[in-house]
């Protein structure tokens, strides 16, 4: 991130366009050793307090011991970030919903992390991994800070938000409750229309779903 723009330059671009930074995916080594303080300073300038590790740290993990080892690393990072009032979150992909030694990777990981390790849940990735989001969104409500609101369809790879297989009537009450999720990020990976039109349609669909959920 800092290789092509300084924090000050990025912050100026954000301000000029009326944008705020609510999260950043960073390289694992940027949160290790002496690099952590530099990363903290960079993100404080951006106004960002939520960090996720690039890639999929739990892939491949074929034993419970490996998963717990990575969970410990996240816990250590979370403890080091706490004095700066910043959080590290885990962003799920599809593979975390595979079973290892009798339990899902996602379950093993979060059961063995410090409570300060936050959850950034991607609903579409979970659905692609074979599970509905609601049970996982309900699991650690105090740690669920951010949600990638994304749909997935087993029959239509270009399904927009609200057109896929997700049970939004179960998901929305969990992510809209007061005192819960701080940031909702509407995401669309494949475009049935030009990108900006697809984004606009996803946003309109989301607004309709929220309106329907609040009336229930």
Image (tube, grey):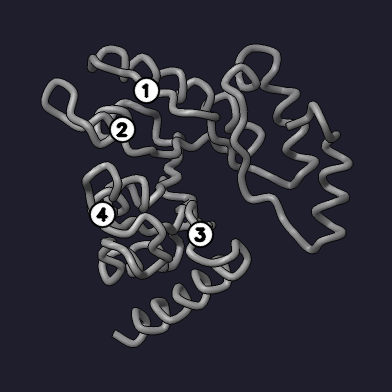
**Would you say 120 lies left or right of 23 here?**
left
Q: Reading the chain from its start, which is encountered first: label 1 or label 4? A: 1
The quadrant where residue 174 appears: bottom left
Residue on which the image places disc 4: 154
Instruction: Please tell me the numbered disc located at residue 210.
Output: none
Residue on which the image places disc 1: 59
Disc 1 vs disc 2: Cβ atoms closer than 8 Å? yes
Q: Residue at x 14, y 20 (%)?
A: 101
Q: Residue at x 84, y 35 (%)?
A: 5
Find the distance from the CA under tag 3 to the CA under tag 4.
Answer: 16 Å
**Would you say 139 lies left or right of 40 here?**
left
SS type, badge 1: loop
Q: Reading the chain from its start, which is encountered first: label 1 or label 2? A: 1
Q: Reading the chain from its start, which is encountered first: label 4 or label 2? A: 2
Quadrant where the C terminus is found in the figure: bottom left
Q: Residue at x 74, y 47 (%)?
A: 47
Q: Residue at x 59, y 35 (%)?
A: 25
Find the distance from the CA under tag 1 to the CA under tag 2.
Answer: 7 Å
Mark 3 is surrounded, within 10 Å at the Cα level, by few (under 14), some (14 to 19) or many (20 or more) other residues, namely: some
Q: Reading the chain from its start, which is encountered first: label 3 or label 2? A: 2
Coordinates of residue 35 in the picture (x, y in percent) = 70, 17
Q: Reading the chain from its start, which is encountered first: label 3 or label 1? A: 1
Find the distance from the CA under tag 1 to the CA under tag 4.
Answer: 23 Å
Query: In the picture shown, does residue 35 fall above or below 131?
Result: above
């Amino acid at each position: 991130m800092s290789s092509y723009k300084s924090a000050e330059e990025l912050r100026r671009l954000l301000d000029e366009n009326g944008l705020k930074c609510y999260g950043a995916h960073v390289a694992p080594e940027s949160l290790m050793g002496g690099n952590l303080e530099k990363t903290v300073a960079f993100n404080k300038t951006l106004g960002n307090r939520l960090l996720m590790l690039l890639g999929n740290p739990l892939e491949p993990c074929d034993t419970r011991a490996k998963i717990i080892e990575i969970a410990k690393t996240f816990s250590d990072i979370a403890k080091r970030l706490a004095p700066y009032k910043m959080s590290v979150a885990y962003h799920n992909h599809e593979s975390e919903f595979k079973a290892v030694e009798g339990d899902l990777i996602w379950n093993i990981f979060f059961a063995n992390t410090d409570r300060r390790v936050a959850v950034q849940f991607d609903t579409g990735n979970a659905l692609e991994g074979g599970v509905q989001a609601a049970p996982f969104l309900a699991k650690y409500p105090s740690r669920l800070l951010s949600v990638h609101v994304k749909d997935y369809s087993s029959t239509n790879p270009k399904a927009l938000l609200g057109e896929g297989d997700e049970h939004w009537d179960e998901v929305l009450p969990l992510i809209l409750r007061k005192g819960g999720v701080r940031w909702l990020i509407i995401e669309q990976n494949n475009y049935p229309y030009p990108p900006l039109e697809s984004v606009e349609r996803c946003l309109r669909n989301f607004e309709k779903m929220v309106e329907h959920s609040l009336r229930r």
